[in-house]
Structures are given as structure tokens and as C-alpha cells.
Image (cartoon, coloured by chain):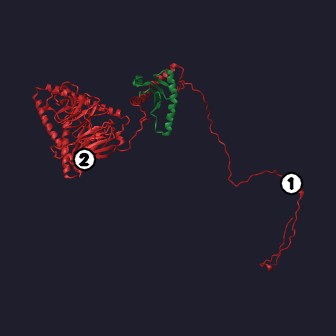
Chain colours: A green, B red
Amino acid sequence: MADVEEILKRIQSHRGVEGAIIATSEGIIMRSTLEEQITVQYVALIQPLLMKTKKTLQDMDSEDELTHLRLRTEKNELIIAADKDYFMVGIHKPSP
Amino acid sequence: MEITHVYAKLRSEFGRQCLFSDRPEEVMVDIHPEPSLASQFILKTRKDQGLQACRDMSEHQVNTERFESNSCGMNHVEGGWPKDINPKDVEQTIRFRKKVEKEENYINCLQHLGSVMEHCIKQNNAIDIYQQYFEEDEELEESSELPSAKTINILRDPNEVKRTITSLSWHPDGGRKLAAAYCNLGFQKNPKDMSLDSYIWEIGGSYGRFNHRGMVLWWDVRKLSEPTERLVLDPGREGNLDRALGAISLEFEPTMPTKFMVGTEQGLVVSCNRKAKTAAEKIVCTYDGHHGPIYALQRNPFFPKNFLTVGDWTARIWSEDIKESSIMWTKYQMSYLMDACWSPVRPSVFFTVKMEGVLDIWDILFKQSDPSLSVKVSDKALYSLRVQDNGQLVACGSQNGEATLLEICSGLSTLQKNEKSLAAAMFERETKREKILEARQREIRLKERSRSEQSREDEAGREDGEDNLEQLIARAENDFYSLVEAEMRRRERREETPQENDVCDEREVQNGVENGKTGDETGNTDLS
């Protein structure tokens, strides 16, 4: 438990990080630094995207697998680190 | 009823040739239809049937498994819960979460994910990886033409005995009038019939004149009989004529009427203030940098705080604030530099002329190690150089009295985009660098002084000092000889010129190397 806390704290300590979410690959929210509604929205939208991406990569090259996904938007960047069973979402606003 | 036809032939007639003949037909049998038989048959219905000569085919229909889909809105609710847990039951969900968190797999997984995440975040914070390089407004306009200079005109000394052109001056109106001052620079070589005329095509009045006797005299153009003021160039500021330095060149900037600078024979640049009351205050500061007389001294027309000096084998750019050394300098050239001046239109371009008759055009924003353009103007040494105010015409005066007019290509005589700011930035940067070096030197000196004060009673320390000096000398000698040998070997390999040239070059090289050594010892580093 403490390790998980530590990980989240470390991530949040970086400059520009707005939030972090940890969830299982099915979409169960384990931890989040944002409030519940937004977290649910993020997870519900990102989880299928992540599944689709994984499946796509698998189809293209069966030996390859997804390490992380970076979604850069005008306002900020979503970094999604994925694993077989869990995934982590970080919302980062990099200062230029 | 049988229909028969009997054909009879005698045996003896077998094999005999057949003789055919015509005869009219005769009805053999005539069978009439019998209606009673018609009742035994049924009439078939008529139908059309198409006939084609092709293969037989058959037709099949197949349907895949049906997939039913329908569109609907999405209600974001947490999902993915295993079947046995009711998502609405808070206790169950909490229990599930706790269970998952205790798994080792979860923790390992998370640590890995965490490090990946951190890496990305750090990356983002360090640089903008989505940055567009070289945005659209940067069109590199490369002047595809190589720098060049064209000789337009050569004005020769009309006298028989050729004298050197020691200085040139363009008419300030920007016209095409050029004044040239001649004098014979050979020591005691005045033949009797040498004309003493200075061929001045137009008269340009100079404001301050100098002489070799170590004084600066002010002349008023209106009153040419006596100097209005005198200043003795004594570095000790005591007005002592015996210790005065011989002056060679003078720099006066019309926008700063109280200050002026003098370049001396000893390689010192003296900066003076005209308005000061006593002679001692007149000399403000000195800049030491050249090993030989300073033949040219000029402020940059765009950045008056920086000035260019030329003497011995280098050209140096100075900043007024830094007194210890020049901020930029060229590497030691192969022959003496006799004159230099800035381009009036481009702040980063200056011209130099050399003893071997070469005119160099330097562009410090383009290349600092070599001149951008080197033009061999004449076989004789070039002694003076002036650029016309439009920056395109350059006049060089040579030893045999020839003044050559060259036209510089437009690339070197038109102000480029951002050139002023780039040149300003460069001068700033170099000035700052020198300041930092100066500060460091001062620190080191302070430290050494304090250390030497501490060990003043230590005899061994003093002896060590002496030893060090001897060691230094020996080391310097070794370095010097090895350098000379290396240079000689290089030249032999490169050139196949006659013996004389080698000797002259050797002497020059030795001189250059020697000066290079002394340069090193004073702590200067050459960036070439």
C-alpha cells in the first residue's frame, strides 16, 4: 500500500503533473488523484481505446506489445502506461 | 406390310460392269394414315426451350451468422467488476480493491508503470519534443555567389622614382575623389631627385596628426603654423618625454569629441581624454596586445565601443571596457598586416592589407578563422587601405606608389538581415568571456599572492620557485624547437619553392612561433 502511495506521490511531485489514475485493464479504478466523476470518465473512455490499441498492435506484429501511449493535445498531454493487467494514466501539462 | 424389292442377276453376269440408265419413277408403296390409330396418342403441350452449347451450372445462396448491433448513448459507470461483486455495494468494492492491492503482481506492475510514466514526464519537462524546428519564417537566403572583388582602376605614381602610399582618404561626400599621401619609407633612402609632392587628388584635411617623437600634436586647419596643444604619450602619465612612446596611428570618432586613441610603436593603444586639464589625466588607459607597432586603429562605425587594431601579424578587436586583452583576434598570418579598416555598411566586416600584397576581407559573423576573401592586389607590399563610404569601393596603396581601386561584391557590401543584432550579440559575448577570464585571473593571482605570503619564511619554497623558472625555460626551449621542426617538415612536404623562400618563411615562422610562445605565457589562448 505504501509503495503505491509513494509511486503516486513521486509522479505528482514533478512539475506540470495535473493528475494520475491507476486502474485495472477491465476498467476498475484502483487509485486516483482526481475527483471521482472525472476519473470515471477518463477510465471509461481510455480503457476501450487502450484495448483497441493493444489489439491493433498485436494484429500487426504478434511479438510486439504496447509500452505506453502518449496523447498530445493542445492543452496538455495524456501519458498512458499499459501493462497486461493494469494501466496508469498521467495528465501532464508541460511548460514550454 | 412388307416393302420389298427383288433384284435378280444371273450368276454368269456377276462382276460385269454396271450399266446405269434413267427411267421414270414408279410408286412402290403408298401408305395412307389410319385415323383409328390416332386415339392411341395424346397431344403434348407446346413449349419453348432454349438450347445452348455450354456447361451446366447450379445456383446456391449462403447467409453468414447474423450480428445484431444497435447504437445507443453511453452512461459512464464503473464497469468491469467481476460477476460476483455488486458494484453498488460499497463494502464489496472496497474489499475487492484491498484484495487487489495486496497482490504482489499489482505492486510490481505498478512500479514498472510508474517508472515509465516518470520517464515520459521528465522528458516533457526537459524539452518540448513536439517543437517545430525551423519554422516557416526562416527562409535561408543563401547568397549563392562567392565573395569576390574586382579591380577597377590602378592609379600610379606619376613620378619616376616610386614612393610608397602611406595613407589614403576618401572624400567625405562619398564622391570618387581619393587623396593619397606618399612618402619614401625606406630608411635614409631619399634620392636627390625624388619629388616631394604628395599626390593629393583632392585635399582632405586631417584633424590630428602625429609624429614619431612620442607626442600628439593638435593642429587647427586654420592655423597650420603651430600646434594648438601637445600631449606627451608617456605610459607613466608623467609627461616625461624620455619615456614617451612613439605614436603611429590615431583614431578620432566625431561623435565622441573628447576621447581619442593613439596606437604606438611599442604595441600599446593609449586612450586619452582631450578635455582633461593636466597632462597626467589626459591619458585614461592603455591596452596592450601587439608585439609590434600598431599600424591601424579604428572604431567600429556601428559599435563605437569596439575598435579594431592591426599590428605585427594579427588583427585584433577590442572592447573599451576590457583592458587586459583583445576580445577577438585573428590567428598569426604569414606576413605583416599593414593597415585595416571596418566596412562602413556592415558591422561585422573589416578589411586588412598585408606585406605580401594581399587584401583580406574578414566577415566575423561568417568565419572567424580565415578571411572570407583574399585578393592578391599586387606583387609589392600594400601599405594602406581605405573603404569608400558606400562600402563597395576599396582603395589600396602599395609600395611602388600604385593605388588600386577594387569593387567588392554586393554580398560583402550590403547589410544583411539581423546583422547588427548578431554582431552586437557576438561582441557582447566575447566581452563577457574576457571579463570572466579576467576575473578568474585576478582570483588566481590573489590566491597565489596569499599563498606566497604564507610561505614567505620557507626557504625551500623560494628555491623551488627558481627551479621552476629554469624548468620553464628549458621546457619553452624544447617546445619551441619541436614546433619549428614540425613547421619545417610541413613546409617541405607542402611546397617545392626555391631555397630562399624557405629561409624567409623559416624566419617568419620562428618569429611567429616565438611570439606565439610569449603569447602563451601571458595566459592568452588562441582560438584558431
Residue mark closest to the camera, 1 vs 2: 2
Say which residue label 1 marks.
Answer: B40
Residue located farthest toward the left when viewing the structure as drawn: B459
Q: From the image, which quarter does the C terminus of chain B lie in?
A: top left
Please name the amino acid that badge 1 sits on.
Gln
Category of crowding for the residue at label 2, using alpha-carbon neighbours closer than 10 angstroms: few (below 14), some (14–19), many (at least 20):
few
Q: Position of residue A25 (x, y in %)?
A: 49, 29
Amino acid type at circle 2 is Pro
What is the chain identity of the residue bearing mark 1?
Answer: B
Mark 1 on the same chain as mark 2: yes
| In the rendered image, the vertical position of residue B90 relative to residue B242, given as above or below | above
Give the side of residue B229 with respect to residue A76, left or right: left
Tell me, yes or no, if residue B371 can be seen here. Answer: no
Q: Which residue is mark 2?
A: B158
Name above or below for residue B95 compared with residue B128: above
The quadrant in which residue B236 appears is top left
Q: Earlier in the sequence, mark 1 or mark 2?
A: 1
Report which quarter residue B484 is drawn in: top left
Q: Which residue extends farthest bottom?
A: B12
- Pick the front one: B284 or B528: B284
Chain of the residue under label 2: B
Q: Residue visible at 33% across and 34% down?
A: B423
Q: Left of B254 or right of it: where is A73?
A: right
The image shows residue B478 at horizontal and vertical percentages of 16, 42
